[in-house]
Image (spheres, rainbow, N blue to C red):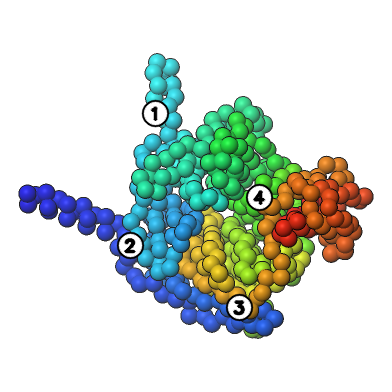
Amino acid sequence: MKKKVLFGFALLCGVFLTNVMAAEPSVDPATYAPRGANGEFTLASKWLYSAKRLNYKVAADLIAPANTARGMALKDGKMLFIDRSNKRIVVVNGTTGVKEAPINLASNLFTYMGRNKANTADSLWTAGLWGFQDIKVDNAGNVLVGNIITSNTGRFQVWKVDMNTGAGTLVIDQANLATLYPLATSMRFDAFGVWGDVNSKAVIMAANAANPAMEVYRWEITNGVVAAAPELIELDNSEATGADFAKMTNLGSAPQVFPLDENYFYVDGNATFPTLVDRNGNVVDGFSKNVAALKDEITIPGTTLTMVTAQNGVAEFEVGGKYFMVMASSNTDKVPPSAFRLFQFADGNKAFSGLTCLWTFPQEGMGDVSNTYRVAMPCVEVSGNKAKIHVYVGENGYGMYEMTVANTPVDQIFDNSVVAVTVSGKTINLSEMVSTINVYNYAGQLIARDSKVSSVDIDASGLYIVKATTVNGITAVHKVVIK
């Protein structure tokens, strides 16, 4: 009887020790001046573990052993980190910064059955170079984990995880990329992105990190079934129409894809700034339209903080009818090292040309410890008039900032999912008849307006903003390219 009690106590201690923290959470000591026309935007550090704060230094503080926590996601106020060394999900309370019990993942994840080399029996094989590489949460709250492949002979897998048991359900098992794309011998997936609900309708995407390769692969899931083959999207890197990727031969190391819906996604790689792209690979928007936004001269008066490529991570969010974007803004060797930048869009069109810098944070950065896998991930949850901005920079720490938006009545209700927009030739087609449609060119000029229609014809090629309002008064805003 005593032996059983002691054994149980040892197990409890083992669980506790895997989550013990040697340091206490700190806060960013900087003060962030209110922004907005009437000072209605405020930003405050709630808690922070960082190399700069000296509380993210020893093993007990770290999310995982060095170089092995390469992805972060957010679900129900919990920060989720994938630990490829221990094959588990590390869980952090997003409100307090305290580690909770990890989710140990089932041993069959990132494996498959295949014939042995002698072709005499089936054997258990490991998929890809590394499993347990990236983690994302879809719009329905499903937690997904993915692996790395380094050529078109690799087996790319994405698994859905049961957060209660650690068991996995295979979502993507792509073993025939060499057959589908025999010319794409230079192929490397480090991360993936997801939009939708993988149990019903979703899109999963991965950017190719190899050189030469300016491409993204897209898997479509319909009725819970993934398409047999991914769609190859070649990114426009021409000088004429692909300015943000012009003359580039690859995206740089560890590129990320962040799908916004079925047709649009951000690409962010070591060699790029976040760039908005459509399903046909057209560059829709990017910092080439607003180079001035790369310089922040407002966070620290008298000091210019220049945003650079190298770290990969971006997120859009909306609070009280206002639209924002947060992204990685500096590498570990820049000033400040490993920081983020928060922008406001001018309106629901969410055009880069209307970006206004609000703050670069932390002002001192997170730290300058080398992070060769380029993860600098922001994830945002919005509740009421507050946005909780959770940030993670590999090897340098993690934290949570809270942005409050006061006195911002909602003038219009936006929901881009209510109306889908497609282009056929010079015709813009809507998924339903709408109350009104307004089409603007990129200079903001109204070039077409109609009511009670489901399509509109445009004469000239170019980039357009489509604002369609349903009979229920909900407005969808989409960017389209007409060739």
Could you tell me which secondary element the residue under label 4 belongs to?
A: loop
Tell me the mark number nearer the camera, choosing from 3 and 1: 3
| Labelled disc at residue 124 | 1
Comes first in the chain, label 1 or label 2? 2
* Marks 3 and 2, how far apart at CA: 39 Å
Q: Is residue 145 left or right of 251 when viewed as pictured? A: left
Q: Residue at x 72, y 58 (%)?
A: 472
Give how far across and how far down residue 223 sits, in percent. Answer: 58, 37
Q: Residue at x 60, y 78 (%)?
A: 406
Comes first in the chain, label 3 or label 1? 1
Comes first in the chain, label 3 or label 2? 2
* Marks 4 and 2, how far apart at CA: 39 Å
Whether residue 365 is visible, yes or no, is no
**Type of residue at label 4?**
Asp
Q: Nearer the viewer, residue 247 or 431?
A: 431
Q: Residue at x 72, y 64 (%)?
A: 348
Pointer 2 residue = 60
Residue at the far front: name it. 472
Q: Nearer the viewer, residue 247 or 40?
A: 40
Whether residue 1 is visible, yes or no, is yes
